């Protein structure tokens, strides 16, 4: 609903079908209008009192009579407005989101440019296709510039290289830094994989730039190239694939990529991807706002978020940073689970919901805790 509200509030020259749909999402409120009139009336009365106090000695009799008549007229008009206050429109989307549009207007009043940053919660949702279309409409029809932050370091590059089948094939899956029947990655997996600082290669950042990375630490285990060779696609090194990544990339060898900033601060790392132009479409599509998430009986809604001072799971796992994760609960949920500050809590979901103990995960959850500070998987709350 946040995207629909942005289009409703900031959109200009919208397609007719969308303009009609958004215009229907308002409620008429006389109470809000009366409150606005009350505030304006108080301000006007204070201004009149101040003017009369400052200029009373210098006002001629005839001017005083005229001012009095004017004041009487304003009072009569104000009274009529109170009896029939103007109708005020309130956005259904703003109401559902708990937004105070007046405060939003105040915050935006002195801003010259606006950005909308979209994270992985939008990308992962089952409604992602509709959200992508709405984000495109926001970019085209509002002053906001849209930035989509990829969920992982090289997610954008992988998305440009790989195409997923509509149907999942039978057989086991290999998860590369993700869950799978066999997991291959850096953190708590079946097969160890090199981290970004242990391998040569390229990745595509959210500036849409393909940048090289060099090994800073030694690594003596399996690499992705070893798995490719086992499947019959062999190259001497992973960087041998750099000039043949696909149509979206340049045919440049890894060793020919620049990797520096000049004295003026200009970026000479790798190369920028080409922007593609597409014909805009005003074709109507179905928009069904998702229902609010509500926990069922015995369930808890958990929102995934990185620790305040971390920015991904790899930095969060670093022993050098020495920061422990934390679980933030409302007092009512903490009481219902029987946990308090300082307890160690394990979060898990049933195997039937797709949980894999090797890779972890949380969704609809139960919790176990031990007051001594040790988790106890057999004491459910």
Image (cartoon, grey):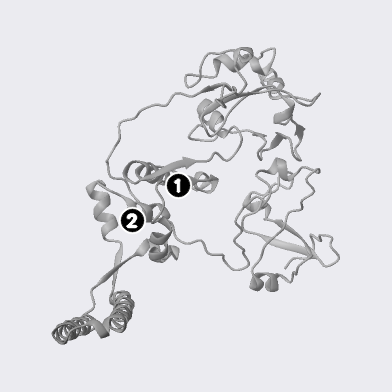
Residue 178 placement, left or right of 64: right
Of the 4 image quadrants, the one containing the C terminus is bottom right
Is any part of residue 372 visible from this angle? yes
Residue 55: x and y in percent read: 27, 81
Q: Which residue is mark 1?
A: 116
Label 1's element? strand
Question: Residue 343 or 318: which is nearer the viewer?
Answer: 318
Label 2's element? helix
Of the 4 image quadrants, the one containing the N terminus is bottom left
Question: Residue 290 or 152: which is nearer the viewer?
Answer: 152
Q: Which residue is mark 2?
A: 9
Question: Residue 206 or 40: which is nearer the viewer?
Answer: 40
- Label placed on residue 272: none
Question: Residue 269 or 327: which is nearer the viewer?
Answer: 269
Q: Residue at x 30, y 64 (%)?
A: 26
Residue 284 placement, left or right of 80: right
Q: Residue at x 70, y 30 (%)?
A: 196
Is any part of residue 232 visible from this angle? no
For residue 144, what is the image quadrant?
A: top left
For residue 275, what is the image quadrant?
A: top left
Q: Are marks 1 and 2 in contact (CB under 8 Å)?
A: no
> Residue 181, relative to residue 121: is it above or below?
above
Residue 16 placement, left or right of 118: left
């Amino acid at each position: 609903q946040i995207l629909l509200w942005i289009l409703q509030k900031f959109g200009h020259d919208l397609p007719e079908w969308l303009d009609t749909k958004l215009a229907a999402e308002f409620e008429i409120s006389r109470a809000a209008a009366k409150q606005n009139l009350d505030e304006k009336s108080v301000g006007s009365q204070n201004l009149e009192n101040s003017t009369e106090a400052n200029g009373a000695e210098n006002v001629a009799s005839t001017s005083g009579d005229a001012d009095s008549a004017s004041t009487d007229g304003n009072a009569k008009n104000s009274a009529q407005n109170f009896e029939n206050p103007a109708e005020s429109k309130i956005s259904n989307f703003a109401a559902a989101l708990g937004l105070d549009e007046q405060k939003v207007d105040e915050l935006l009043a002195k801003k010259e440019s606006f950005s909308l940053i979209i994270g992985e919660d939008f990308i992962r949702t089952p409604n992602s296709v509709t959200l992508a279309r709405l984000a495109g409409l926001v970019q085209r029809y509002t002053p906001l510039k849209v930035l989509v932050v990829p969920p992982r370091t090289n997610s954008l590059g992988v998305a440009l290289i790989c195409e997923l089948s509509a149907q999942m094939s039978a057989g086991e899956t290999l998860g590369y830094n993700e869950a799978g029947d066999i997991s291959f990655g850096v953190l708590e997996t079946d097969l160890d994989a090199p981290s970004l600082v242990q391998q040569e290669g390229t990745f595509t950042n959210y500036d849409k730039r393909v940048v090289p990375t060099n090994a800073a630490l030694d690594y003596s285990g399996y690499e992705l190239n070893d798995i490719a060779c086992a499947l019959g696609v062999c190259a001497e090194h992973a960087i041998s694939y750099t000039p043949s990544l696909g149509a979206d990339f340049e045919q440049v060898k890894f060793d020919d990529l620049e990797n520096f900033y000049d004295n003026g601060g200009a970026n000479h790392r790798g190369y920028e991807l080409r922007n593609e132009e597409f014909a805009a479409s005003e074709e109507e599509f179905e928009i069904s706002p998702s229902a609010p998430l509500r926990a069922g009986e015995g369930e808890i809604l958990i929102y995934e978020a990185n620790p305040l001072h971390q920015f991904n799971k790899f930095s969060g796992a670093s022993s050098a940073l020495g920061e422990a994760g934390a679980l933030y609960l409302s007092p009512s949920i903490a009481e219902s689970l029987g946990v308090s500050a300082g307890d160690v809590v394990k979060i898990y979901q049933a195997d039937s919901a797709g949980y894999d103990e090797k890779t972890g995960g949380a969704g609809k959850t139960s919790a176990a805790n031990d007051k001594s500070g040790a988790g106890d998987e057999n004491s459910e709350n």
